[in-house]
Amino acid sequence: MTTRQVRLNQARQVSNRLYDRGLRVFPDGTTRITVERDPVPRYAKAGRGAYLEDVDGNRLLDLNNNFTTLIHGHAYAPIVEAVASQLACGSCFANPTEYEIKLAELLVDRIPSVERVRFVNSGTEAVMFAIKAARAFTGRPAIARIEGAFHGAYDWAEIGQAGTPLTWGPPEDPLPVPLYAGVPASIADDVLVLRLNDIGGLQRLEDAADRLSCILIDPMPSRAGLIAADPEFLTALTESARRNGVLVIADEVLNLRQGFQGASARYGLTPDLVAMGKIIGGGFPIGAIGGREDVMRVFGTRQAKGSLPQGGTFSANPVSMLAGSIAMQALTKDEFDRLEQLGNQVRAGLSEVIRRHCAAFSVTGAASLFRIHPKEQPPCEFRQAFCNKAEAETLMRLHRHFLASGILLPNGAAASLSTPMGAAEMNMIVECFDDFLSQANQR
Ligand code: PMP
């Protein structure tokens, strides 16, 4: 099937009706700010493999995959079957189950920096408890983080996430921009914002080190541009952290999908703590904190240093643990290699199309992730990746073009591949982009 053969039902009658109802019960109509709407959201009916069906009768290649979570696509049969039979035996207990040990064993076996694990229910919680663990271990309150990176909804982790040219301050001294009005000033006082790949800027980390518990870093922050941290930057950052007794927290909630051993191993980072989520739950809510045995001891009840109470009604529920184990076991080294090759194919194809059309676009990403930027040069950090109004409009046109061709391309965020995809889907994506640039040239 070529992309041009798809006929999209643009009327969205059912979605419109649902949105009207949603507006009566939810502020802004839905319950996630991240839900795309143009102008109304596209309501989902079902998902099968690489494809999503909406309530208006459209079938779309899903490159969102619930924000990169569904690495095996929708309704992955081994998980559907196992979870269905587990549900008949109970969905959550106040007691531990063997499933949590199984999933933790897999993570400890695979991920070099993970010696002990703690399960929670979301990536937000994983980042939050990793930060709390660093505070409990070091006895210090403040954190450092990378400008523009998204780390979930813990107040300290949100500072510096959403700066704009009007608010983000000078490049040599990025400001701790709060995310919303009314954030206590004391929170911003305890956050140092660094720029990705700015080695010179690490002097500020040295200067603030005696108050810093941790530096929080995603080796390829997606919202900040899906740009890789340079190995030299990671080395300098880690050395500075170690010298000053500051812990390194890798946020791999999204990027664990970059390889069998995760993202830190891939980029040469050796974190003390790792925040995980998304793919490790097999499509069910999950988060996890992993890390060095001595640091993770703060979660214990009998440890000598620090003490961090952590529970959670649904933490380590057997459904998420079981689904996660099945999803992760199916992600063998070979399967990661295959995803990597598909990613290489699509990124190379998109770049080739850009060259052929001499278009002012570029592509970033790695493994099973890619992002198209309306920028001639691939951005090297958040400020370069930031889109002005005209660029944001270009991205919206691109998003609409993909939709009209039957492909759900996240707008201004990372697109992700899933294991049910193959070369045919990669060709479909590249061909669709080719069409877009051909039409743009004719305008
Ligand atoms: N960290 C990163 C890097 C993420 O991408 C996300 C989610 N997009 C989070 C944290 C928060 O995870 P959750 O939405 O599960 O709370």
Image (tube, rainbow, N blue to C red):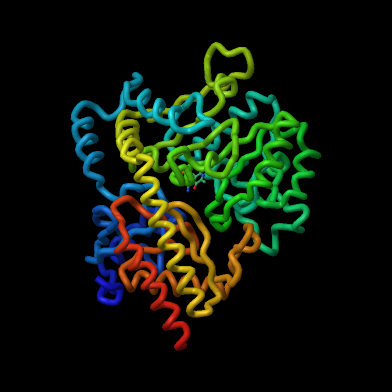
Quadrant in which residue 345 is drawn: bottom left
Does 406 sit left or right of 229 as displayed? left
Residue 246, position as x, y percentages in the image? 69, 32
Q: Residue at x 52, y 77 (%)?
A: 359
- Numbered label tally: 0
Quadrant in which residue 415 is drawn: bottom left
Residue 295, position as x, y percentages in the image? 59, 23
Q: Compared to 154, does 210 lie above or below?
A: above
Q: Considering depth in this image, is 394 or 234 the residue closer to the camera?
A: 234
Quadrant in which residue 306 is drawn: top right
Most distant residue in the bottom direction:
442
Q: Considering depth in this image, is 202 or 399 the residue closer to the camera?
A: 202
Q: Residue at x 34, y 31 (%)?
A: 321
Q: Is residue 145 visible?
A: yes
Residue 293, position as x, y percentages in the image? 55, 21
Q: Residue at x 81, y 39 (%)?
A: 207
Q: Considering depth in this image, is 417 or 120 the residue closer to the camera?
A: 417
Q: Considering depth in this image, is 366 or 72 the residue closer to the camera?
A: 366
Give the quarter of the figure containing the N terminus: bottom left
Q: Residue at x 39, y 42 (%)?
A: 279
Does 77 sit left or right of 240 as displayed? left
Q: Compared to 363, does 281 lie above or below?
A: above
